[in-house]
Image: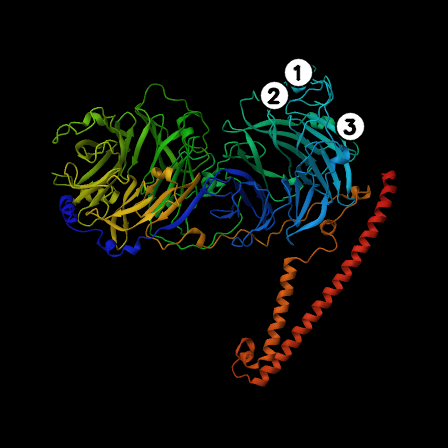
């Protein structure tokens, strides 16, 4: 049968013989993973290490994860030990602290990514947690209202246990869980605890409550809800968050009815209460119609508030997610620019109230989608202190859909993630609707690097931490370049790599919305990138094809609004619609609009032709030299060809014939005496149509229909590969192959074609060739002719059974053992898998995760490779800001972080793991010295004692001397430890005495200041 197929195909050689003789080469490797396995649940950012942490929900197949992203392609994944979702993640110097949906705490070491995480299961349900760089404590707010402290360094629970303090205020109140925790920005000894009933300012120094903050709306006061506004009794809306002013001057509490209350922490007085639109909502009759609820509207809850500051901590603004009326169409973040904070000593109560009632500016930072912002992450420039919002440069917002949006702060201008975020996050910014892949020549891809000088306004540097682990450099391979399409009309292009060093890690972005001059109907159906020329075509659902070329921007610096051309133009010149801020890049060239429905197939060649297949069944060929349309006709009208008569169809009511696969090649067609450029069109009815492109006098080309070949009826064509029937090399339409046509060089060729049900090798345009059906056991989802250098080629298929099966060429006989991808790729999205001619297979392995496989690998997975470096010990967190001299003179009792460690951990706090390791090392050194003393022979052979020419007695003498030195060192160490312990106890006694003394003096100074 194999011999007959070889004769039928017109190929006299076996191009897969070496592969068949070495079946062991078929080994599946997981080369790379990109994207997220499930939806994003939370975000965190560390401005010191410049790292971004992203937590995810659990999915049906995987547990929640924490992804840490750094510069370029730095990416490390920490996985939870049990199946759960990530509720919160906080970066605390060299640690990532994670709270999951199972109420467990996981602590991962950024300095040792391979180390297992430390786990702690609190006694109850954790509702919130708080960490801070420079502190060894995790403060846990419990559902019971208690606050626990976990020692990160000692891995034990601290003896400090703050009870439910709100019960002192309202003993009969219902169970009030802790909803948020916040340490004072300048006084580490003061903690703001928010319960659902109110907020409490707690002092670690005094172990007592300093202030109770309870927001009460009197009868008739306007509220955020129309129905609630009619209530004639006092209302206490539940607290959702409490936070400090960046310098601790004020406290803000957010409530479930979208009201924000600002307090003076000195005396607990209410300074101002307001919604996004109105101030003084706690005052009866302050708004028209407040008594009966008219004029009010239902509002969204406030999801999150951040109190941000400029480089001057007293120049502040409030960034608010939520709180808008439900009738508001535009979704976004609200920004209240409060301006400089009034002086608390010289300002009246009315001045303080007006500061929050009348912001300097107020705006809505709009979102590009209609989804609400449920969480956001402020990106500070340098310091993690001042409440985490010090001098921010950007904001990354998390939408209710799980997508990301990046905005510049404070103007709210959208920032493209192409130059800011890791490609894994680009797939969620917004969610990609389609992913195409191309093999691009290395030289071409390196020439498409985006240099900073090519941008008039370089984007801000946000995530620049970490170092990638070294990878091999493969200089002569084509690059695997991905084109991800997004619903906002953007196409982002980047190198996925082959598990090697990526020389050009830039992410290029195409803005189709700018070229089409609209903001709606921007669904991208397909993208085709030419591997040599770099020309890119984007096909839209609305029928337009936008062609881009790598060129210099002729519209650089020209901000002009171009009107849409009047009338119906098939080809529109759009070179002036390029982004004026880019000097060089993928610039728009033209738009092809044939009004034939959605684009369903698209191919951009390397020799200046673009083929387009439409939903209506039309085929269009565009010559970019004009540009000019050289062919446009319905495939159904070609049912009667020149030689075979009417097309066959067992289904009389067959659907419209449409193109499913387009390829350009150079070969000698059947019956011709010369080679030519050919276009092969595979259809949904299992046919392959051949077109010939020839130059004409006066310039330009013509496209003529030559004939048709049939595969299985009604089985869509998946792949078409032209190969040289003498050498087995692919005969794509390249500039070199086109130049050979002028020299009269003939290229004998056949095409290898695969459909869902069968495969065929034949000489176009009408020869029958060799044929093989897959049978009834499976169908094929993706196929391509792949080549392993020095071994040959084979037809690689991805089947519905989740197997990769290879076939010889031209015998079409299975070779090698089938490779299973069931545990790697999602079965329901196998039809979106792509097979590259290099033997790589790209498919979806998660909700938003791509996996690149290699069928001729070394049985390796990404988990077996060394991880990137995340933590830089040379950049520790900066010192925490402290209180001013005036506050100290006014009687504020200031404590250091060491004092806080004593107050929380107590005097019997165990040694840290570093100290324990030091003692273990000292003990090991002593044992080794004793062993050498007892065994002179072994001591003479090992270490420095085994030096050439040294006698036994000389070695014993030197060992004795070294042991004496080590014992002396150990004795000194123990003596110093004893002295340190005594000194520590003495310091504790002095500290307790000083606290008593300060308490007495505090009562006296409180009367004076």
* Residue placed under numbered mark 2 in the picture: 298
Q: Earlier in the sequence, mark 1 or mark 3?
A: 1
Q: Residues under labels 3 and 2: Cα distance?
A: 31 Å
Label of residue 319 in the image: none
Q: Earlier in the sequence, mark 3 or mark 2?
A: 2
Asked if the residue at tag 2 contacts the one at tag 3, i.e. Cβ–Cβ closer than 8 Å, the answer is: no
Q: Earlier in the sequence, mark 1 or mark 2?
A: 1
Label of residue 349 in the image: 3
Q: How many labels sit on residues?
A: 3
* Residue placed under numbered mark 1 in the picture: 293
Q: Residue at x 64, y 61 (%)?
A: 916
Q: Is residue 654 left or right of residue 89?
A: left
Q: Is residue 259 left or right of residue 815?
A: right
**Foreground residue among 873 and 163:** 163
Quarter location, residue 302: top right
**Looking at the picture, does residue 306 appear above or below residue 506?**
above
């Amino acid at each position: 049968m194999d011999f007959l197929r070889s004769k039928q195909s017109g190929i006299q050689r076996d191009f897969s013989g070496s592969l068949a003789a070495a079946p062991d080469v078929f080994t599946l490797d997981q080369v790379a993973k990109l994207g997220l396995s499930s939806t994003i649940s939370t975000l965190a950012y560390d401005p010191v290490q410049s790292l971004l942490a992203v937590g995810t929900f659990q999915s049906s197949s995987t547990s929640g994860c924490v992804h840490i992203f750094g510069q370029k392609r730095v990416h490390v994944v920490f996985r939870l030990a049990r199946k759960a979702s990530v509720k919160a993640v906080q970066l605390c110097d060299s640690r990532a602290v994670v709270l999951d949906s199972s109420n467990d705490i996981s602590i991962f070491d950024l300095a040792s990514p391979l180390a297992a995480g430390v786990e702690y299961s609190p006694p109850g349900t954790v509702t919130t947690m708080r960490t801070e760089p420079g502190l060894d404590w995790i403060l846990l707010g419990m559902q019971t209202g208690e606050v626990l402290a976990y020692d990160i360094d000692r891995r034990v629970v601290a003896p400090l246990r703050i009870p439910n303090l709100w019960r002192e205020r309202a003993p009969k109140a219902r169970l009030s869980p802790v909803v948020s925790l916040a340490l004072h920005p300048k006084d580490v000894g003061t903690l703001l605890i928010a319960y659902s009933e109110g907020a409490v300012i707690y002092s670690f120094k005094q172990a007592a409550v300093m202030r109770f903050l309870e927001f009460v709306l009197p009868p008739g006061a306007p509220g955020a809800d129309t129905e609630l506004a009619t209530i004639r009794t006092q209302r206490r809306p539940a607290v959702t968050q409490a936070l400090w002013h960046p310098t601790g001057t004020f406290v803000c509490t957010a409530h479930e009815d979208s009201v924000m209350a600002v307090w003076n922490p000195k005396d607990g007085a209410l300074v101002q209460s307001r919604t996004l639109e109105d101030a003084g909502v706690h005052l009866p009759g302050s708004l028209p119609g407040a008594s009966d609820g008219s004029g009010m509207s239902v509002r969204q809850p406030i999801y999150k508030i951040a109190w941000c500051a400029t480089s001057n901590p007293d120049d502040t603004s409030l960034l608010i997610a939520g709180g808008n009326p439900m009738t508001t169409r535009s979704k976004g973040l609200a920004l209240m620019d409060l301006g400089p904070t009034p002086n608390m000593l010289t300002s009246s109560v009315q001045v303080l109230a007006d500061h929050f009632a009348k912001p300097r500016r107020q705006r809505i930072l709009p979102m590009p989608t209609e989804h609400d912002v449920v969480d956001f992450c402020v990106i500070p420039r340098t310091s993690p202190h001042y409440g985490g919002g010090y001098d921010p440069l950007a904001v990354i917002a998390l939408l209710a859909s799980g997508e990301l949006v990046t905005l510049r702060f404070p103007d709210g201008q959208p920032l493209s993630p192409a130059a800011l975020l890791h490609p894994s996050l680009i797939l969620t910014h917004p969610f990609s609707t389609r992913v195409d892949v191309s093999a691009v020549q290395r030289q071409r891809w390196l020439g498409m690097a985006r240099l900073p000088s090519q941008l008039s306004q370089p984007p801000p540097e946000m995530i620049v931490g970490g170092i990638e682990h070294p990878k091999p450099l493969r200089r002569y391979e084509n690059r695997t370049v991905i084109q991800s399409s997004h619903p906002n009309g953007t196409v982002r292009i980047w190198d996925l790599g082959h598990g090697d060093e990526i020389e050009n890690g830039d992410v290029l972005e195409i803005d189709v919305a700018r070229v089409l001059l609209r903001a709606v109907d921007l669904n991208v159906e397909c993208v085709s990138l030419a591997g040599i020329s770099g020309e890119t075509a984007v096909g839209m659902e609305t029928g337009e094809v936008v062609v881009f070329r790598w060129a210099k921007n002729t519209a650089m610096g020209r901000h002009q609004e171009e009107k849409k051309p009047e009338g119906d133009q098939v080809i529109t010149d759009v070179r002036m619609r390029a982004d004026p801020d880019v000097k060089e890049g993928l610039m728009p060239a033209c738009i092809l609009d044939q009004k034939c429905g959605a684009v369903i197939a698209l191919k951009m060649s390397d020799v200046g032709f673009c083929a387009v297949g439409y939903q209506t069944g039309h085929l269009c060929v565009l010559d970019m030299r004009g540009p000019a349309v050289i062919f446009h006709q319905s495939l159904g009208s070609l049912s009667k060809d020149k030689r075979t008569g009417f097309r066959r169809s067992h289904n009389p009511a067959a659907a419209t014939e449409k193109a499913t696969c387009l390829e350009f090649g150079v070969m000698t067609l059947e019956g011709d005496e010369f080679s030519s450029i050919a276009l092969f069109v595979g259809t949904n009815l299992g046919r392959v149509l051949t077109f010939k492109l020839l130059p004409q006098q006066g310039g330009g080309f013509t496209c003529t229909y030559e004939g048709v070949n049939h595969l299985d009826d009604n089985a869509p064509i998946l792949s078409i590969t032209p190969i040289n029937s003498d050498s087995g090399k692919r005969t794509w339409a390249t500039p070199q192959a086109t130049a050979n046509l002028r020299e009269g060089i003939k290229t004998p060729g056949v095409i290898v074609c695969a459909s869902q049900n069968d495969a065929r090798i034949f000489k176009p345009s009408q020869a029958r060739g060799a044929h093989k059906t897959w049978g009834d056991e499976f169908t094929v989802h993706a196929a391509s002719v792949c080549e392993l250098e020095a071994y040959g080629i084979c037809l690689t298929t991805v089947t519905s059974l989740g197997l990769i099966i290879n076939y010889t060429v031209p015998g079409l006989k299975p070779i090698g053992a089938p490779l299973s991808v069931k545990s790697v790729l999602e079965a329901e999205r196998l039809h979106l898998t792509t097979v590259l001619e290099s033997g790589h297979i790209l498919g979806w392995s998660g909700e938003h995760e791509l996996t690149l496989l290699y069928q001729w690998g070394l049985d390796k997975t990404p988990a077996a490779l060394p991880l990137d470096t995340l933590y830089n010990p040379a950049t520790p967190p900066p010192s925490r800001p402290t209180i001013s001299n005036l506050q100290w003179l006014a009687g504020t009792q200031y404590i250091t972080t060491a004092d806080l460690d004593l107050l929380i951990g107590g005097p019997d706090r165990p040694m840290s793991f570093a100290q324990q390791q030091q003692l273990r090392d000292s003990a090991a050194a002593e044992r080794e010295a004793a062993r050498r003393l007892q065994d002179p022979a072994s001591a003479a052979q090992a270490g420095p004692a085994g030096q050439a020419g040294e006698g036994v007695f000389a070695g014993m003498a030197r060992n004795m001397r070294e042991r004496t030195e080590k014992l002396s060192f150990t004795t000194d160490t123990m003596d110093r430890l004893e002295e340190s312990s005594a000194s520590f106890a003495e310091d504790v006694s002095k500290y307790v005495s000083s606290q008593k003394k300060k308490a007495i003096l505090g009562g006296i100074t409180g009367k004076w200041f």
